[in-house]
Amino acid sequence: MSIALRNYLIITGNYWAFTLTDGAIRMLVVLHFYQMGYAPFAIAMLFVFYEVFGIVTNFVGGWLGARIGLNRTMQVGTALQIIALLMLTVPNPMLTVVYVMGA
């Protein structure tokens, strides 16, 4: 396997893993707060909050990509996504709005 193909497969696999875990987090957060009894409007506002900070992180990610390189930025982003997923594995009583949105 050529180095170019190997790099392509690593980046593509990383992108798919990130996309799937990010989508899973979004759905799980919405469903969790629905089960906790939050009103649909409150859940929508949490989702808007999540999306706004997604825009902020895209700007920061672009800035970091220009500063430290795309490969390192991808590695840092993947590590942060894993940490966020692990933070959501705590017992249900610990999953408060502030904690979940911080994860």
Image (cartoon, rainbow, N blue to C red):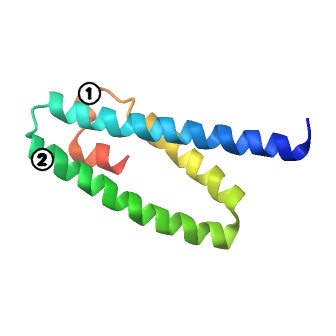
Which-is-in-front pick, marks 2 and 1?
2
Where does the N terminus fall, quadrant-wise?
top right
**Numbered disc 1: secondary structure:** helix
State which quadrant residue 94 falls in. top left
Q: Position of residue 85 (x, y in %)?
A: 45, 36
Q: Is residue 43 left or right of residue 81?
A: left
Q: Is residue 32 visible?
A: yes
Q: Residues within 10 Å of mark 1 (few under 14, many from 20)?
A: few
Q: Is residue 64 left or right of residue 96?
A: right
The residue that disc 1 covers is 92
Residue found at x 33% / y 55%:
51
The label on residue 42 is 2
Q: Quadrant of residue 33?
A: top left
Count of numbered badges drawn on the protein: 2
Residue 87 appears in the picture as rendered: no
What crowding class fits label 2: few (fewer than 14 Cα within 10 Å), some (14-19), or many (20 or more)?
few
Nearer to me, 81 or 24: 24
